[in-house]
Image (spheres, rainbow, N blue to C red):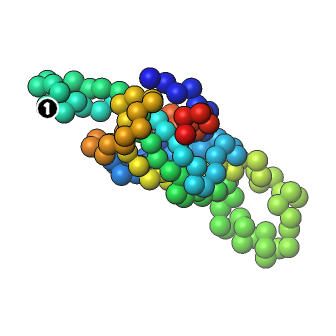
Amino acid sequence: MSLRGTLVGHVVCNTSPQEYRFVMKSVAARLGDLVYLEAQIPRSREVSEHYKSETVIVWGRIVELARYNPFLQVEAGRELAEEGLRLTDTVLSVSRDQVDGKVLILGMTREANDSQLKPLSYPISPGSEVYLPPKEAV
């Protein structure tokens, strides 16, 4: 079922069938990019009476990106501004920026080549890997 896309990050925090947040690798994707992940969801009652799970591909679009440096707090920025100091003249880290993203879930498919999106009815697991699809899959 795998599409063999490019890994861009991992799902974090609370998720829902409508959206999720992820931590992105440095400059791995852009706002508006289509992304996907593989998820385990319960089968519907029509398919199985025992609610066994199935693997699906969940498609989404990056609708928000935020960049921050956890080592550069507001107080430190204020002090730099007040004292007229350059960030590079301090011991504060300038290389630990993180980018968080929010993905709006568009739907799911059961197969990689399935073109019919169906609504997702179960939240995805935090820790899931988020991928950019290969060009031929889009």
Q: Tell me: residue 84, above or below residue 19.
A: below
Q: Is 113 in front, or is 103? A: 113
Q: How many marks?
A: 1
Three-letter amino acid code of the residue under disc 1:
Arg
Q: Is 126 in front, or is 122? A: 122
Measuring 67% from the left and 54% from the top, which residue is drawn there?
Answer: 69
Residue 32 lies in quadrant: bottom right
Measuring 45% from the left and 29% from the top, which residue is drawn there?
Answer: 112
Residue 89 lies in quadrant: bottom right
Q: Tell me: residue 53, above or below residue 90.
A: above
**In which quadrant will I find the C terminus?**
top right
**In which quadrant will I find the N terminus?**
top left
Residue 36 at what x, y percent from top left?
Answer: 49, 39
Mark 1 residue element: loop
Q: Tell me: residue 79, above or below residue 138.
A: below
> Does residue 119 appear left or right of residue 48 in this picture?
right
Residue 99 at what x, y percent from top left?
Answer: 62, 51
> Does residue 121 appear left or right of residue 2 in this picture?
left
Q: Tell me: residue 39, above or below residue 120.
A: above
Residue 136 at what x, y percent from top left?
Answer: 59, 33
Find disc 1 in the rendering and name its residue.
Answer: 45
- Residue most toward the left? 49
> Does residue 73 appear left or right of residue 131 in this picture?
right
Is residue 10 at all visible to an observer of this figure?
no
Mark 1, Cα crowd under 10 Å, few <14 / some 14-19 / many 20+, is few
Measuring 11% from the left and 25% from the top, which residue is drawn there?
Answer: 49
